[in-house]
Amino acid sequence: MKQISFNFTNNKILFDLVDAPVADAWWQQMQLKQTREPLTPSIRMEPDFPRFSDVEECNRRILQNIKQMEEYDFYMDWPEDINAVSQENLNALHQQFHAKEELYKDELPQSAHDTLQQINQSVHQIEQSRADDPVNYAVLEFGTLETEMSIARDIELEERTWFQEAYYEQQNPVSLLLGYCTLGKHLGHCVWTDDVQVVVDGMLRPQKHIYTQVLFRHEPNFQPRTPADVQRHNLLQHQHQARWILENKLESHVSADDPVHCYNTAPVVAYVNAQHAELTEQDWFQIWTEQTLQTVDLQD
């Protein structure tokens, strides 16, 4: 069995690869990258554990970051009261972040890019805190972006079916998901956040490549699914996306039947090994926030 070991300061956590083409494609990218440089891990977005988050602090950071970005013609009237922040506000701020990063990626100094990334992270943290069933995440990258871009693997049209739920016998609450690693939002994001404007403005960004980036996901209220549950979920997701497009009169902009926009989940590439089954949400929070992920090892 293929495994990847996350070597933290005081814990070694093993993940078992799932038996699926998407996991094989990710593993091949990891192996290829390892031939070019060390797989030095870095946290792209700080671990987000909504039950432990201070959303008021997130909102204060947004206000500070918007102020810092004014010198780069980034303006937005933002509520000081977190309770006044709507999903519409969050969508508009995320779209402005996307536009600024995309249009001026080669012109802005690194400090401005860092500030924009902080805005992006705060938006997602507030959204996660409001979810009916909050899930814990961390976004991880390995090695350098330069090497990543040089080895990026295209996603073929017939591989778009990877981006829906799949059934695995070893399913459990802790998994690694294939990273989106793309600036902006895909159709699934827009449906989940009811973001019509991104579609209207032609700013949908479907994932085009397989990258080494992964998302650590911990589901505190995890419920195992049967193959029939998975099939039903995927059908309902597709129907929901199609209905959302019709209700918002977006048929001239996007089709739910276009395989390029087939995306209702980030696919699982690995589940945590059974030896770590007793780790609690508090344990995972402490591992991610009080320890350092020092190295990773690929084990065939």
Image (cartoon, grey):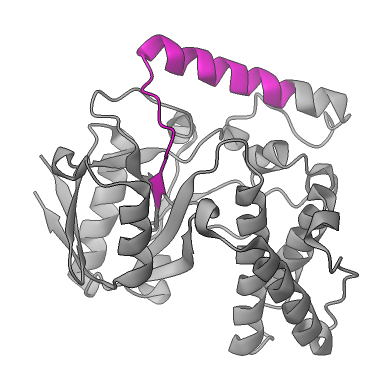
> In this rendering, is residue 69 above or below 124?
below
Determine whether, in the image, residue 280 is placed left or right of residue 252. Answer: left
* Residue 74, x across and y down, in percent: 83, 78
Q: Is residue 205 visible?
A: no
Total labels drawn: 0
For the N terminus, give its image quadrant.
top left
Determine whether, in the image, residue 269 is placed left or right of residue 120. Answer: left
> In this rendering, is residue 134 above or below 160?
below
Q: Which picture quadrant has residue 122?
A: bottom right
- The foreground one among 14 and 260 is 14
Q: Residue at x 52, y 49 (%)?
A: 208
In the rendered image, residue 103 lying in the magenta stretch gets the answer: no
Determine whether, in the image, residue 206 is placed left or right of residue 47. Answer: right
* Residue 236, x across and y down, in percent: 60, 17
- The foreground one among 140 and 36 is 140
Q: Residue at x 24, y 49 (%)?
A: 27
> In this rendering, is residue 262 above or below 203?
above
Determine whether, in the image, residue 30 is placed left or right of residue 206. Answer: left
* Residue 214, x across and y down, in percent: 38, 54
Hey, which residue is sitting farthest top in the picture?
228
In the rendered image, residue 235 lying in the magenta stretch gets the answer: yes
* Residue 218, x across and y down, in percent: 39, 45
> In this rendering, is residue 131 above or below 60?
above
Q: Which residues are magenta?
A: 216-242
Q: Residue at x 24, y 23 (%)?
A: 169
Q: Is residue 229 visible?
A: yes
Q: Residue at x 56, y 33 (%)?
A: 264
